[in-house]
Image (cartoon, rainbow, N blue to C red):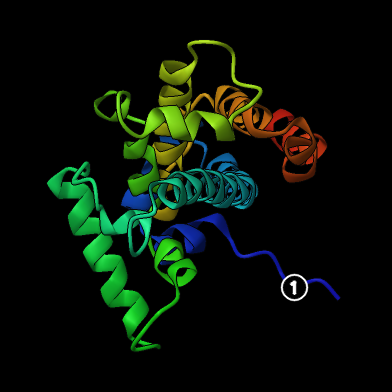
């Protein structure tokens, strides 16, 4: 048996008028449509959260593998994120230190993979920045065998946009003005650069297309 429909005015009261305001404005004041649009926004956000999550983990592992291989060739002790070549900027070093602290809460000597998993999407985004083009990028580039020649700038911009989208979703913000088909294309570009096969696995194109076309 389906549950009774909550009147739109009650939904607004429980969610708060300010939270629903962007949806009401997008529906020219129609509260019924605004509530439907809010539910649609939540469904689209959940779908993107899933696939962007896949993209974040795949990107993280691709960069980690490339820098681990580079570090191994140098025969330096420790791990690449110990920064033996003193290449990382203060922000990155702060992120690594914070990841170590979080990883150490459950293990006094956390394995490298645990520390890497604690590093945020923003950390990996900044490793693709131009400042690291002469140092880290030549090694990272090998993890993107299908990236067009000279595509670091395009890759960085796509990852920046995906990071911003992820943050909007994480804060339950409206996606009404977000170019969602373009963000889908950004994710496809990132994953295709690593492996078209992994892109096919990670992206549920039909589900996203149906949701995007079903906006109230």
Q: In the shown orientation, is residue 201 left or right of residue 10?
A: right
Badge 1 crowding class, 10 Å Cα cut-off, few under 14, some 14 to 19, many 20 or more, is few
Q: How many marks?
A: 1
Of 96 and 1, the residue lying toward us: 96
Q: Residue furthest top?
A: 149
- Residue 26 seen in this snapshot: no
Q: Residue at x 50, y 28 (%)?
A: 141
Of residue 181 and residue 152, the one placed in the foreground of this image is 152
Place residue 110 in its image quadrant: bottom left
Residue at image position (44%, 57%) is: 12
| Quadrant, the C terminus | top right
User: What residue sits 22% from the left and 41% below the top?
Assistant: 87
Residue named by callout 1? 3
Q: Which is more toward the observer, 54 or 132?
A: 132
Residue furthest to the left: 90
| On screen, residue 5 above or below 128 | below
Residue 144 in view: yes
Helix, strand or loop at mark 1: loop
Residue 49 horizontal/vertical position (percent): 57, 50
Residue 198 vertical position relative to residue 144 in the rendered view, above or below: below
Q: Position of residue 126 (x, y in %)?
A: 31, 38
Left or right for 32, reference 199: left
Residue lying at 65% horizontally and 48% vertically, measured from the top left: 47
Residue 192 versus residue 173 in the image, above or below:
above
Picture coordinates of residue 195 (x, y %)? 71, 33
Residue 177 image point, x, y percent: 45, 27
Please say if 137 is above or below 87: above
Quarter holding the N terminus is bottom right
The single residue placed furthest to the front in the displayed view is 75
């Amino acid at each position: 048996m389906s549950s009774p429909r909550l009147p739109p005015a009650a939904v607004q009261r429980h969610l708060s008028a300010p939270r629903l305001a962007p949806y009401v404005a997008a529906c020219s004041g129609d509260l019924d449509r605004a509530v439907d649009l809010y539910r649609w926004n939540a469904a689209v956000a959940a779908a993107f959260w899933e696939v962007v999550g896949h993209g974040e983990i795949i990107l993280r592992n691709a960069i980690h593998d490339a820098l681990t291989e580079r570090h191994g060739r140098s025969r330096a002790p420790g791990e690449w994120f110990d920064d033996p070549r003193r290449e990382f900027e203060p922000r990155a070093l702060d992120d690594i230190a914070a990841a170590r602290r979080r990883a150490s809460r459950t293990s006094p000597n956390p394995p490298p993979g645990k520390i890497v998993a604690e590093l945020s999407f923003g950390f990996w985004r900044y490793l693709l920045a131009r400042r690291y083009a002469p140092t880290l990028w030549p090694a990272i580039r090998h993890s993107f065998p299908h990236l067009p020649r000279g595509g670091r700038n395009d890759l960085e911009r796509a990852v920046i946009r995906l990071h911003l989208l992820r943050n909007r979703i994480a804060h339950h913000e409206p996606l009404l003005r977000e170019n969602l088909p373009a963000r889908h294309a950004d994710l496809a570009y990132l994953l295709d650069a690593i492996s078209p096969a992994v892109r096919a696995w990670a992206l549920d194109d039909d589900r996203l297309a149906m949701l995007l076309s079903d906006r109230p």
